[in-house]
Image: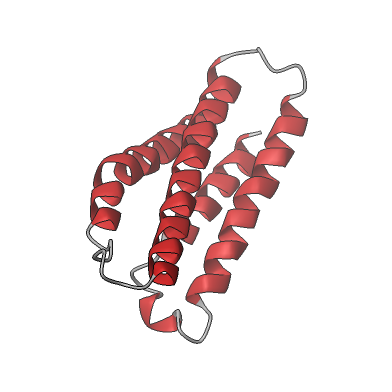
C-alpha cells in the first residue's frame, strides 16, 4: 500500500465524480438550440464526445491507481506506471496548449484541469 498512489487514486476518483455528475450537467447547458447551423451542432457534439473521453480516462486512471496501490495483479508495475505518466503528461500538454493559446488565455484560471493531470503524474512518479 502506497500513500501517494492512494492520494492519486482519490484525486482521480474525485475528478471522475465531478466530471460525471456536475460537469455533464454543466456541459448540457451549452447545447445550442435546434435553429443553429448544422456545423455548430456538429461541433457541440464533438465537444460532448471529448467530454466523455476525459470522463472515461479519469475512470481508467482511478482504476489503475488503485490496482497499483492495493494489489499485486500487475506483473510489470513500472511499465504501467510509465505508460500512465506518459498518458497523464499528454493530457497536461493538451490542456496547456488550449489554455495558453491566444483565445484560451482569458480562461486560464477557470480551466485548471491540467493541474489535476500533472498532480496525478507527480503522485505516480514519486509513488512508484
- For the residue pair 81 and 90, the one nearer the viewer reads as 90
Residue 10 seen in this snapshot = yes
Residue at the far bottom in the pictured view: 102
Q: Quadrant of residue 91?
A: bottom right
Q: Quadrant of the C terminus?
A: top right
Which quarter of the rendering shows the N terminus?
A: top right
Residue at 46 percent across and 84 percent down: it is 103
Question: Where residue 84 appears, x then y in whole percent?
Answer: 65, 40
Which quadrant of the figure has residue 104? bottom left
The image shows residue 80 at horizontal and vertical percentages of 71, 31
The one nearer the camera, 123 or 16, is 16
**Percent position (x, y) of residue 11?**
41, 40
Q: Residue at x 68, y 35 (%)?
A: 81
Q: Is residue 106 left or right of residue 2?
A: left
* 38 lies above or below 65: below
Task: Report whether residue 4 is seen.
Answer: no
- The correct choice, above or below, for 101 with respect to 68 in the image is below
Which residue is located at x 65 percent, y 13 percent? 72
Name the spot of residue 83 as percent of width and height, x first: 72, 40
Amino acid at each position: 500500500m502506497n500513500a501517494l498512489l492512494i492520494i492519486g487514486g482519490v484525486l482521480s476518483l474525485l475528478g471522475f465524480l465531478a466530471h460525471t455528475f456536475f460537469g455533464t450537467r454543466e456541459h448540457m447547458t451549452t447545447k445550442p438550440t435546434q435553429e443553429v447551423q448544422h456545423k455548430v451542432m456538429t461541433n457541440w457534439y464533438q465537444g460532448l464526445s471529448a467530454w466523455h473521453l476525459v470522463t472515461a480516462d479519469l475512470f481508467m486512471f482511478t482504476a489503475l491507481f488503485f490496482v497499483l496501490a492495493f494489489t499485486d495483479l500487475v506483473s510489470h508495475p513500472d511499465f504501467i506506471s510509465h505508460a500512465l505518466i506518459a498518458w497523464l503528461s499528454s493530457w497536461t500538454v493538451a490542456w496547456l496548449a488550449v489554455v495558453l493559446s491566444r483565445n484560451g488565455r482569458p480562461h486560464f484560471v477557470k480551466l485548471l484541469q491540467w493541474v489535476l493531470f500533472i498532480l496525478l503524474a507527480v503522485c505516480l512518479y514519486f509513488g512508484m
